[in-house]
Amino acid sequence: MNAKKHPYGIISVLLLILVMIAFISLGIGAVYTSPVEVFTNLIGKSQSNHFILFNYRIPRMLLAVIVGASLAVSGAILQGILKNPLASPDVIGVTKGSGLFAVAVLIIFPGASMVALPFSAFLGAAVIAIALMLFSYTQGTKTHSLALIGVALGAICQAGIQYFMIKFPDNVNTTLLWLTGSLWGRGWNEMWFLIPCLVLIPLIIIFISKLDILNLGDEMAVGLGERIKYVRYTLLSISVILTGASVAVVGSIGFIGLISPHIGRRLVGSRSKFLLPVSALIGALFLLLADTVGRGVVPPIEIPAGIVTAIIGAPYFLYLLRREQKNK
């Protein structure tokens, strides 16, 4: 049975697995909660560990699902508009831009309100996106121009991050924790920063057919009456907002935007109608599982989710890179 012929079945299975992992994750941590206790708390029949579940683990689980889905959808969009299977939010420099602005706030204004960190990270993503659009506009939004300019901007931001860390070594630990990416200490207050993700992910349905048309090539898209500059910039903006909001909340978690669309294509093919929701589910699963493993391996010590995703994602990236070289 060919899985690509049964996308709705694949989506249903992924949803079921996501619900199961989400339920299991609520019991994992420094204070273990059995599945029975979790269930009785959820239905209001018990108050055992009620505070921990409803003030820490449930919001953390929801954040992992939303952020993972947002990064995966962002990666799928970028791979579509750049026509590059190795593209991800990291490639166009958005993640690095968020990191640079956040590190600057952490180091230069250590006494600043915690609200300033997400806002600065989102501002960094927006600045990089605007710079990317301005630089690429003169090149007619060619896909290779967007990718190369993004790599250059990301390298500049990475140099800035390294400068701050060398210049102000006293705050390196806090900086490294944020750059690694972690859901530790996140709760209901951070959910407000993900409202753009909750709004944009459903709205992407409007552009699903346009993304498929872009994949046919610019000449074909123009022949079908599409305004490729408008469509490409709109999709790029959506991708940047999803990435910026996600990084603003959990830090720089890598590989989700790269790996999830690839797994999605192997399951349901390249049609955006199925690829985007499947990628979102895989991204949500990936980050939720990474966070659960990170806090459950050696409790009460937590391994940042970004480290777990890197352990899984780096070998897979090398595999993809080798496969791409063989296909050339």
Image (cartoon, helix red, strand yellow):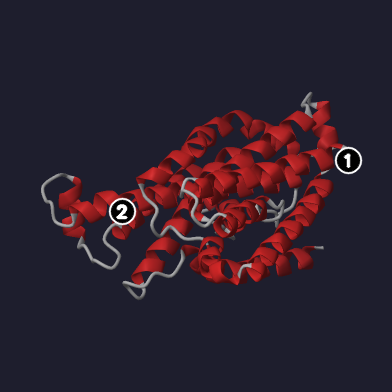
Q: Is residue 266 left or right of residue 131?
A: left
Q: Which residue is mark 2?
A: 56
Q: How many marks?
A: 2
Q: Which residue sits furthest top?
A: 225
Picture disc at residue 139: 1
Q: Is residue 50 left or right of residue 56?
A: left
**For numbered disc 2, what is the local secondary structure?**
helix
Residue at 44% of width from left, 55% of height from top?
A: 285
Spatial CA distance of label 1 from label 2 is 48 Å
Q: Position of residue 222 (x, y in %)?
A: 82, 29
Q: Which residue sits furthest left?
A: 45
Question: How many residues crowd around disc 2 within 10 Å: few (fewer than 14), some, or many (20 or more)?
Answer: some
Judge whether residue 278 can be spotted in this image.
no
Measured along the vertical axis of the image, is residue 69 above or below residue 328?
above
Residue at 79% of width from left, 32% of height from top?
A: 229
Front label number (1 vs 2): 2
- Give the quadrant of the C terminus: bottom right
User: Based on the displayed image, in which of its 4 quarters is residue 103 positioned?
Assistant: bottom right
What residue type is disc 2 on? Tyr
Q: Which residue sits furthest bottom?
A: 298
Residue at 58% of width from left, 60% of height from top?
A: 107
Measured along the vertical axis of the image, is residue 3 above or below residue 163?
above
Picture disc at residue 18: none
**For numbered disc 1, what is the local secondary structure?**
loop
What residue type is disc 1 on? Gln
Measured along the vertical axis of the image, is residue 245 above or below residue 176?
above
Going from the N terminus, do you reach mark 1 or mark 2 first?
Answer: 2
Q: Position of residue 49 (x, y in %)?
A: 18, 57
The foreground one among 183 and 16 is: 183
Callout 1–callout 2 Cβ contact below 8 Å:
no
Residue at 71% of width from left, 55% of height from top?
A: 91
